[in-house]
Protein backbone atom coordinates (compact mmCIF):
# COMPACT_ATOMS: atom_id res chain seq x y z
CA UNK A 1 0.00 0.00 0.00
CA UNK A 2 1.29 3.40 -0.86
CA UNK A 3 0.56 6.66 0.94
CA UNK A 4 -2.49 7.56 -1.15
CA UNK A 5 -4.18 4.22 -0.51
CA UNK A 6 -3.45 4.47 3.23
CA UNK A 7 -4.91 7.98 3.41
CA UNK A 8 -7.95 6.86 1.44
CA UNK A 9 -8.47 3.91 3.77
CA UNK A 10 -8.18 6.12 6.86
CA UNK A 11 -10.63 8.66 5.37
CA UNK A 12 -13.10 5.91 4.47
CA UNK A 13 -12.92 4.42 7.97
CA UNK A 14 -13.43 7.90 9.46
CA UNK A 15 -16.49 8.56 7.27
CA UNK A 16 -18.01 5.16 8.04
CA UNK A 17 -17.36 5.65 11.77
CA UNK A 18 -19.01 9.07 11.68
CA UNK A 19 -21.99 7.62 9.81
CA UNK A 20 -22.31 4.86 12.40
CA UNK A 21 -22.26 7.41 15.25
CA UNK A 22 -24.99 9.43 13.55
CA UNK A 23 -27.22 6.43 12.79
CA UNK A 24 -26.79 4.60 16.12
CA UNK A 25 -29.13 6.81 18.23
CA UNK A 26 -31.86 6.52 15.62
CA UNK A 27 -31.58 2.73 15.48
CA UNK A 28 -31.60 2.47 19.28
CA UNK A 29 -34.71 4.69 19.42
CA UNK A 30 -36.50 2.54 16.85
CA UNK A 31 -35.66 -0.61 18.80
CA UNK A 32 -36.96 1.00 22.01
CA UNK A 33 -40.20 2.07 20.30
CA UNK A 34 -40.75 -1.45 18.95
CA UNK A 35 -40.20 -2.91 22.43
CA UNK A 36 -42.70 -0.47 23.95
CA UNK A 37 -45.23 -1.20 21.18
CA UNK A 38 -44.84 -4.94 21.84
CA UNK A 39 -45.40 -4.41 25.57
CA UNK A 40 -48.51 -2.32 24.91
CA UNK A 41 -49.86 -4.95 22.52
CA UNK A 42 -49.25 -7.74 25.07
CA UNK A 43 -50.96 -5.71 27.81
CA UNK A 44 -53.98 -5.13 25.57
CA UNK A 45 -54.18 -8.83 24.76
CA UNK A 46 -54.14 -9.79 28.44
CA UNK A 47 -56.69 -7.07 29.23
CA UNK A 48 -59.17 -8.41 26.65
CA UNK A 49 -59.98 -11.31 28.98
CA UNK A 50 -60.75 -9.00 31.91
CA UNK A 51 -64.12 -7.30 32.53
CA UNK A 52 -64.71 -3.86 31.05
CA UNK A 53 -63.38 -0.86 32.93
CA UNK A 54 -65.67 1.61 34.73
CA UNK A 55 -67.17 4.49 32.79
CA UNK A 56 -64.30 6.79 33.70
CA UNK A 57 -61.34 6.13 31.47
CA UNK A 58 -59.15 8.58 33.37
CA UNK A 59 -56.45 7.28 35.64
CA UNK A 60 -57.01 7.59 39.38
CA UNK A 61 -53.31 8.23 39.94
CA UNK A 62 -52.47 11.94 39.78
CA UNK A 63 -49.96 13.07 37.22
CA UNK A 64 -46.49 14.22 38.21
CA UNK A 65 -47.46 17.83 37.52
CA UNK A 66 -50.47 17.55 39.86
CA UNK A 67 -48.35 15.93 42.56
CA UNK A 68 -45.71 18.66 42.23
CA UNK A 69 -48.29 21.48 42.31
CA UNK A 70 -49.98 20.05 45.41
CA UNK A 71 -46.62 19.74 47.12
CA UNK A 72 -45.84 23.38 46.34
CA UNK A 73 -49.23 24.50 47.68
CA UNK A 74 -48.78 22.62 50.94
CA UNK A 75 -45.33 24.19 51.42
CA UNK A 76 -46.84 27.65 50.91
CA UNK A 77 -49.55 26.96 53.49
CA UNK A 78 -47.01 25.77 56.04
CA UNK A 79 -44.63 28.67 55.52
CA UNK A 80 -47.42 31.32 55.69
Image (spheres, rainbow, N blue to C red):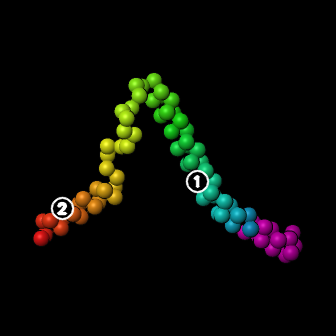
Q: Nearer the viewer, residue 58 or 13?
A: 58
The residue pinned by badge 1 equals 29
Q: Nearer the viewer, residue 50 or 3?
A: 50
Q: Which badge, 2 or 1, is on the more N-terminal residue?
A: 1
Could you tell me which residue is drawn at 51 percent across and 29 percent down? 45
Look at the image and say whether residue 41 sits in the magenta stretch. Answer: no
Residue 56 visible? The answer is yes
Look at the image and say whether residue 6 sits in the magenta stretch. Answer: yes
Q: Which residues are magenta?
A: 1-14
Could you tell me which residue is drawn at 56 percent across and 48 percent down? 33
Q: Quadrant of residue 80?
A: bottom left
The image position of residue 29, as x and y in percent, is: 58, 53
Q: Is residue 28 left or right of residue 60?
A: right
Residue at far front of view: 55
The residue pinned by badge 2 equals 74
Crowding near the residue tagged with mark 2, few <14, some 14–19, many ≥20 C-alpha atoms within 10 Å: few
The image position of residue 4, as x and y in percent, is: 86, 75
Could you tell me which residue is drawn at 40 percent across and 25 percent down? 51
Does 5 sit above or below residue 53?
A: below
Report the magenta stretch's main SS: helix
Q: Is residue 72 left or right of residue 58?
A: left
What's the distance in space between the residues labelled 2 and 1, CA to CA?
39 Å
Amino acid sequence: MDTNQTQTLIAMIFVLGTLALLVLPSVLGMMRDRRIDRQIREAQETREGEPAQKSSSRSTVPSTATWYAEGRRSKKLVSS
